[in-house]
Amino acid sequence: MTSEKEVLLHIGFPKTGTKTIQKFCHVNREILARHGTLFPKFDDSLTRGLPGVHIPFAAAIMRRKPPHLSGLDSATLEQSFESLFADFKKSDFQKLIISNETLSQHGDLDFPKLMTAAAGHKVTIIAYIRRYDEWIESYYRWYLTHGINQKIQNFEDYPPRKEMEQNTFSKKLTELKAKLPGSTFAVRSYDTVKDQLMHDFLEICELSESAELHHAISALSRENVGMTSGDSLFLAQVVSRIGNGSVSRKVAATIGKKAKAGEPSPLSKLPGAFFDVESRAKAREIFNADSKILAKEFGLPAAHTPPPTLRDAQRITALSCEQMNDMIEFVAGEFTPDELTELRRAVAC
C-alpha cells in the first residue's frame, strides 16, 4: 500500500562520502531491488555521465538551473520526475532512495512540487555532517580542482570559510525542515561513521539485515586517489596568483592523473592544511556548539571534537620555494612552454 512506502532523500552534505554512497547504490541497484528498494536510473542523456548522482531529480525541482545544467531539456526532465514517483507508487517497491546534494544547498528549489510528488509516502531526509575544519578544507580542495568560481582565489575568501558561523549545519537543516513539513530526519556525523559509512547508511534505510548487501560493501572500492592535502597547497598557490583558469585546472588534472597511475607527487605525504591552529580551534568550537543543537533538534548521536593537538600544530600551511619548484618539475611534462612560463610566474618566490 502507498502508506507503507518510504522516500529516502540522501542530501549529503558535500564531502561526507556522498560519492561512495551513490556508487554503491548505483552498482548494486539489482540487489537493492531484490530487497524492495528502488535506486532509480535515469536516461543517460540527462545524467551528465554521473548516473548515481540523480541530477535529473535535482534539475526538475530547480526553478533556475546553473549554467552546467541549462542545456537539459525541461520537458524531458519533467517527464522523468513525474514518472519516477508515479511508477514508484504503482510498483511493488517499498522504498525509493534518491541521492543528490542539491537539497542540502537549498537554492531556488520548488519544495512544494517535491512534497506533492511524495504525498502519501513517509519522507526521510538522510544527512551526514562533518567537523567544520576538516569539512571546509576538504570542500576547498574540491573547489580548487573544479574551478567553479574564478573570482575566489584564496581560502579566506571561500564562502564556507567566511560564513561558517552563520551557515551552520543546524541552520541549514532547520530551514530545510520548515520547507519539508512532516519529514523525518536521520542526521549522522561522518567523522564518527566514516569507516563504516555504508553499514550506517544501510541501517538508516532499514536494509542492514541483508547479507547480500553486506557482501557488496566488502567489494566496494573507495576512490580516494588524487589530490592530497600537500598537493592542494601547491594548487592553492597557483590559483591565488593566476586564478582558476586553464593552467590551474591542468595542474589539478595532471596531479590526479599521475596519482591514479601510481606516481604520487613530491608533496603527497606532506600534512598540508589551510587553517592555522587558532582558526582550527575556533572551527571546532563552532562545530561542537552546533552538534549540541543538532543532538537536541535532530537526534544527532554525540559528535564532540577535541581541541587541536600537537599533530595539528605541525601541519604545514605554506610551501617553500624548493617544494613549489619540485612540483613544477613533477607536472612539467604535460604543459606547453607558454603554460610553463605562466606556471613559474605563479609560484615565483
Image (cartoon, rainbow, N blue to C red):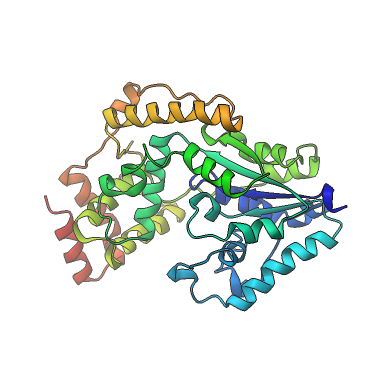
Q: Position of residue 7 (x, y in %)?
A: 72, 51
The residue at the far left in this view is: 349
| Residue 291 or residue 55, whichever sits in front | 291
Residue at the spot 55% in from the left edge and 24% down from the top edge: 302
| Residue 272 or residue 96, whichever sits in front | 96
Question: Can I make out residue 192 in this image?
Answer: no
| Residue 331 or residue 124, whichever sits in front | 124
Q: Position of residue 347 (x, y in %)?
A: 17, 54
| Residue 171 or residue 164, whichever sits in front | 171
Q: Position of residue 163 (x, y in %)?
A: 34, 43
Question: Can I make out residue 185 in this image?
Answer: yes
Residue at the spot 78% in from the left edge and 53% down from the top edge: 120
Please give the count of numbered marks on the rendered protein.
0
Would you say 215 lies left or right of 304 here? right
Res 205 → quadrant: top right
Residue at the spot 47% in from the left edge and 57% down from the top edge: 107
Q: Position of residue 327 (x, y in %)?
A: 26, 52
Residue at the spot 52% in from the left edge and 49% down from the top edge: 104
Would you say 25 lies left or right of 158 here? right
